[in-house]
Image (cartoon, helix red, strand yellow):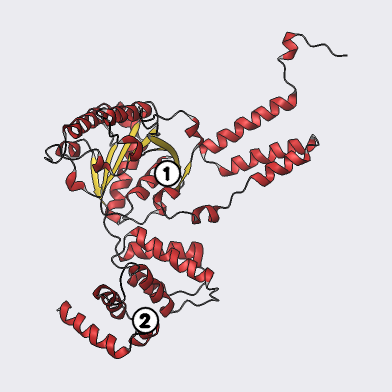
Amino acid sequence: MILFNSKNNSVPKRGVNMKSSLVVKLIEAHSSGSEDAFKNALNILADDEEKKGNLNTSSSLRKAYVYDKKRSAAYSDSPLSEMSFSVQNAIPMPKDKDSTLELLEILTPKITLSDVALPEKTLQAVRQIVAEQKSVEKLIDRGIAPANRLLFCGPPGCGKTLTANALAGELKIPVAYVKLDGLVSSYLGQTGTNIRKIFDFVKNKRIMLFLDEFDAIAKKRDDSNELGELKRVVTTLLQNMDAMPSNVFLVAATNHHHLLDPAIWRRFNSSILLELPNVEQRTQIIERFYSEKLSEYDIDIKTLTILSEGMSGAEVQSFMQSLAKYCVLENVNKVVSQKEIAEIWLQQNTLFVSENSDDFMKALYKLKKNGISLRTLEEITSIPKSTLDYRFKKEELNDE
């Protein structure tokens, strides 16, 4: 018979100690975003259970873990899919008092600048900011303020969120992604309070604070259509930006930079306009997607690049996703024809357009101008070549 005193009661067996330490390792691995470390710790835990004879537990642990990078990436085309949720979300997040919605979520970037197609001039500007952020302490020691407030402007889908993710990835810091649905409140004074909560939460962390759709809280205060509440919100935002410490890297993004209050502009060290991708950037996006998901197929990259003219980066990505789905669902053997590419392009660009409309004919005319023959267009649309030729001549006159 073994007797336990109060001290012995508190002494766990070696197996309990080992399990506790493995659980800690699992949490640390997930928090750091290291999938290899997470998998390794889980396997050790499963092996330990197996040695104890707990075969069902060991088997359940192994089956519960499924990590398929290709599958997880396929679920979303959103730029946020380039981040993984961090266990740091176990830390209580600031919430809106009335709706109880969380004001932000902590995300871990999975990409760097090498994964983003940017013009060389823009890339140089971004790399300068990265260099300053990596040398924050050195600059501060010399009395030089590092750039830690960056504004991205540009149309939807041009890569603002994606570039912000890549910046955080380069710096190896998490991202506090502000959720506008929780931030903006209908209750008087609550939006300003929520802004203060967010800045208070990040002020002691080495982190990127990402404010998407920034114009929602930073509009011009002289807008006659807005109530006094907006002025108070902007004032609160300005005060918190001024008080923000150098360890926080603030990145904001807007599709409507013309709506921003003039005082907001002065708070940023740098503003970068991200425009629709040029031919080199589109080719880069297409070639990267092709090498990752379509390399087994024979596809004319040049045709894809030409037809993607005028698309945003997100639209080019969506075009390639549609092409990949077609190859899988239609059991394409090897070669993807020009006709098939044109069909996919037409479907994506005329989804909400009647086939009898001028917009539909303009889309066909663009295909014709980019090398798709009348015969192929006739096969795709069942519109006689003579009719297409007549309508295209009218389009040519309009071009003149």
Image-based side of 37 in relation to 237, left or right:
right
The residue indicated by pointer 1 is: 169
Badge number at residue 278: none
Residue occupying image coordinates x 77% and y 39%: 50
Q: Picture coordinates of residue 1 (x, y %)?
A: 88, 14
Res 398 → quadrant: bottom left
Residue occupying image coordinates x 49% and y 54%: 75
Q: Mark 1 falls on what kind of element? A: helix
Image-based side of 355 in relation to 295, left or right:
left
In the picture shown, does residue 363 fall above or below 286? below
Res 185 → quadrant: top left
Q: Note whether residue 167 is visible.
A: yes
The residue indicated by pointer 2 is: 381
Res 53 → quadrant: top right
Q: Picture coordinates of residue 200 (x, y %)?
A: 34, 26
Residue occupying image coordinates x 55% and y 73%: 331
Amino acid carrying mark 1 in the image: Gly
Most distant residue in the bottom direction: 386
Q: Picture coordinates of residue 91 (x, y %)?
A: 47, 29
Mark 2 neighbour class, 10 Å CA radius: few under 14, some 14 to 19, many 20 or more: few
Of the pair 207 and 400, the residue shown nearer to us: 400
Q: Mark 2 falls on what kind of element? A: helix
Amino acid carrying mark 2 in the image: Thr
